Amino acid sequence: MQNSKKRISAFLSVIIAAVFVLSVVFVVFESEHHCSGEDCHICQTLISCLNNINNLTPDPNVTQLSAFAVFAVVLLIGSVCVKLNSNNLVLLKVKLSE
């Protein structure tokens, strides 16, 4: 179960990285194309690729805020786990044999 979750996570991260890299490559190669008018498919794809790049690259202020939030949540979960695990059978020296 755990191994399949790792594989799925790795696969999705590779797909996201590929989308980012391919978007950058498309923008670089097609930035000087000859536009055919309002219904230019290359222009529409360029806009889509630029939106992908903007959505996949975080804003520095948002990154700092999210890092602080993640750090606070990890500290909170850690303190709750310590409180919940303070009374276990080993620490209470309970003998489980018959």
Image (spheres, helix red, strand yellow):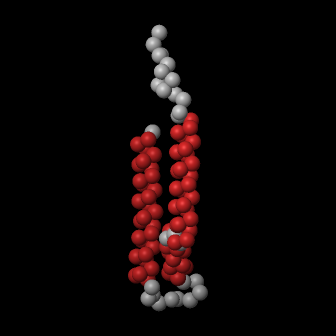
Q: Is residue 25 above or below residue 2?
A: below
Residue situated in front as seen by the camera: 97 or 19:
97
Q: Give x and y (percent) for residue 18.
A: 41, 65
Residue 48 is left or right of residue 11, and the answer is right
Between 95 and 5, the one nearer to me in the picture: 95
83 above or below 14?
A: above
User: In the rendering, at what x and y percent does residue 44 appear?
Assistant: 55, 79
Residue depicted at 47% across the width and 25% down the height: 90
Q: Is the N terminus in the top left, top right, bottom left or bottom right quadrant?
A: top left
Looking at the image, is 48 positioned above or below residue 40? Answer: above
- Quarter of the image for residue 4 reads top left
- Outermost residue on the right side: it is 38
Q: Nearer the viewer, residue 85 or 32?
A: 85
- Tally of numbered tags: 0
Residue 55 visible somewhere in the drawing: no
Which residue is at a point 45% across and 67% down the rendered structure image? 19
Q: Which residue is drawn at 46% across and 63% down?
A: 16
Q: Is residue 14 in view from this perspective?
A: yes
Picture coordinates of residue 69, whole percent (x, y)? 57, 58
Q: Which residue is found at the position 53% from the left and 33% from the top? A: 86
Q: Quadrant of residue 25?
A: bottom left
